[in-house]
Image (cartoon, helix red, strand yellow):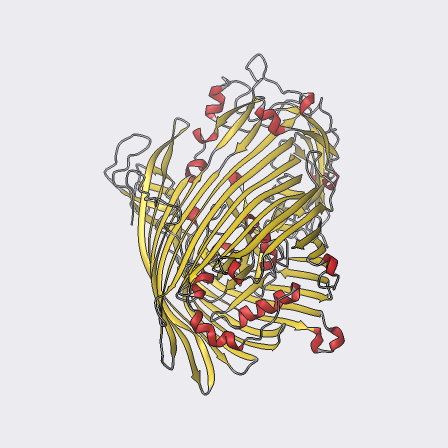
Amino acid sequence: MLNFKPSKLTLAILSTSFMAMSSSFAYAQESEAKDDKKKVADVEVIEVRGFRGSIIESINTKRFSSEVVESISAEDIGKLPDSSIAESIARLPGLTAQRLDGRASKVSIRGFGENEGGTTFNGREQVSIGDNRGVEFDLYPSEIMSGVTVYKTPSASLEAEGIAGIVDMQTVKPLGQDDRVIQFNGSLEQTSFDKLNPDGNDAGFRGTFSYMDKFADDTIGVAFAYSTMSSPNQEKRWNSWGYPEFTYEDGSAGSILGGAKPFVRSSTLERDSMMLVVEAAPTENLHMTFDALYVDFTDEKILRGIEIPFAWGQGSISGNTATIDPATGFVTSAITEGQRVVVRNDYEERKAELTSFGFNSVYELNDTWQVEFDASYSQVDRDIWSIESYSGTGRGDARGEADNLGYTFNGGNTGAQFTHELDYSDFNLIQLGGPLSWGWSSALNAKHGVVGTEYENQLQDGFINAPSIDDELTALKLAATHDLDNEVFSSIKFGASYREREKTKESEGYFMTLSSFDYPSNPGMLVVPEEYREGSVNLDFIGMGNMIAYDTNGLIKDGYYDLLAESLTNPSHSTQSWTVQEEVTSAFIQGNIDTEVGGLPVTGNVGVRYVNTKQSSQGSAFNTVDGLIVTSPTDISHDYSHVLPSLNLSLRIDDQQTLRFGAAKTISRARLDEMNASVNASYNQQPDQNGNHWSVNGGNPALEPKEAVGLDLSYENYFSDEGYFAVALFNKELSQWIFDGTFEVDMSGVADPSTGQVPANSTATGNGKVNGGEGSLWGYELSLSFPFKMIDDSLDGFGLIASHTAVESDLKDQNDNEYELPGLSDKIQSLTFYYEKDGFQARASMRKRGDFKGDVYGLGFSTSQVDILGETIWDAQIGYDFGEAGIESLKGLSIFFQAQNLTEEPFTSLQGENALQVRDYQDYGSTYLLGFSYKL
């Protein structure tokens, strides 16, 4: 049962940013170095060069890992195979990515969405800029990473949690470098679309400087990298309001376009990043590493389009103009007469600042004992300033010139084409102000003195969404490893860790009203001043011709609009504002296996992890009194624990063949926006069916993690230094999944917001997310890396990398209703053809996924789930390394040309099962990069 208490701040923040961090996988592996000596001795020493060298290193990481992993490695900082970490990850077997504004950003592992997996930086769990736990990978620059490892099966010593798996991003280790490195990387970027907005960008750049060196007889290593990026992106987007359903006279079902909001977008993502690694080995027994990462991230968007009401509008639709699809009853074309539209000039700025620190120390007490201490701190602030500016022919529903508008759906999931009669590029016709009766706010009406007048509820001339996120995580870990001398276990490792996370979201919105508005003397619209005009924007892709373009941000900064907080009358900001805190204490013990069965080597680990969680949330309970929102503070806490056993076994059949088995219980924590304490609480005089007078709607801070018991079985054949094939089977039994439901809430001591009195009956019926239901997910993976030199030596340099994953699920909620997992595509494929020899490199890569359900941003930047169509994306790159080609005078210099999304694959989502009912059709075009790398 939940308990409401008066809200109070109870955080304990450690005095230094290094005093609470979790251990990294990379550093933890060092503490087990003795276990790996035998394996390392068997590995052929290969000089890693170029893309083929990265393939060899990734194969060896997979081959000699105790867990089931996939990996990407880079020869040098800034030389990961792709320009985005998410794009590189999405090519790995069983993984795929969801695009956000044209960029691969959210990663799915084996059919699970990004919220079911963990993400770490040097093995330490990271904060996120979104509302939840899922990391948006475009925040992290690939230019300063040395590699990525994806753990598909866990071990007890790994700190992060995730049913899907763990993605670990890694920085370079300077003591592992042979020589001093000074390197410069740079590239120019161009979109295939010309500027879709006159004040947008279609060209950008990227640049990286990196330095690595060793000092004091190779006992101190330093690595520093600075990366800057200004990356443009263009988009033509069809977006529908929805498709209302109705019944024809013969009783058959029909549907029609309710309205649409198509637009063109010009974006520029600017990111400045700095990375520092200091590695020290002052004695043979002591190894210390400090790493720091700073990222300053700004994503600016300019969006212009026309919002067109149709069936949900004021116009009249004649049945004589309608064309109906006989198979579905959907009205594929129609005309509405006497309809007014909203011309939109929008601007959005998303800013984030990430800081991450980590310290790891491994001390070898003697030949058999090692101790490890790890500490980390990461923090991110994210602010969004999203402006909607409206213009039209007159204020409100009934003023100004109306238009006769038609639409036609031509199929192909591309949305509709419109016809129109008015000239939307005429600054004298289209003026600033709200052309439809939006903004039904009693506070807005009262502020401008229009209550009871013809202008009531007509003063929303624009709107600003301004949500913010602050996420902070600190962690500590202390562990020890003891080498053993027996026939089964080579060592035993045990330890404890503590981490504390606090995430706060503040939601607010502002009504925009022209400062010149004055009732009754000046209630009309405003012609856009000359100095703010940007010309026009072409909307021929939807048939609407040209529309006016102006500088919305400049108008606001110069005082042309008056702002009023929407939270005065809209309760959604109260439910979307919250703080969630987690204190996680863990202890583990793990035996590292090194033995023989039937004369065959068996390695791996077996262990158990105990996890205790104390979670709490602060928010508000609210009600509406006299049209205004009245809130009272809430503070809810809950605790629980899990025991998580794990087993990883690797049977080495011979020098080429390995059989792996993994079994583990894993958890994925609830989404943060679903476990917050902000609710709509109301007291009703009549009890509900549960006998409760209180009714509560909102978050549920008593949500516990989803659980899974997973089994993995795989066969791997390493037939060449850069070649292998693998077959993997996996199954996960899911329980405690999270669905909509009801729960009991204790409201003792909480006053009824409408009266200020504490009711005698303190029990409430809560409506929100609950744990319940169960099911299964299973599938198989096929992966291959094949160098064509295996066919004939003349084909040396040619090769391919391919994978195919098939996933099925059977999951039901607590009411036995079927449920489809977000992020699950039933089929995922990737394919890369490459050639690299004598300095010349060329490759073409494809990633493909089936249809899936995915999260997108909705109203107020809350996330909503939609049906997204599958996609096939092709990229290509050619390059030339002068040093590898034997040109000594240009040694260290390489150049490349890269093309992304060659086939201009769109992003498409649907509303319902009718393929004509397109919710979103986003056309990004292609992107081209021309760059170089120079290494001194």
| Image quarter of residue 490 | bottom left
Q: Residue furthest top?
A: 521
Q: Residue furthest front?
A: 217
The front one of 686 and 852 is: 852
The picture places residue 271, in percent across and down from the top left corner, at 58, 44
The front one of 603 and 765 is: 603
Left or right for 465, reference 679: right
Residue 703 visible: yes
The picture places residue 516, in percent across and down from the top left corner, at 58, 17
Residue 252 visible: no
Residue 372, compared with residue 39, is above or below; it is: above
The picture places residue 923, in percent across and down from the top left corner, at 68, 47
Left or right for 20, reference 116: left
Residue 110, compared with residue 751, is above or below; it is: below
The picture places residue 552, in percent across and down from the top left corner, at 62, 29
Query: Which quadrant is the C terminus positioned in?
Result: bottom right
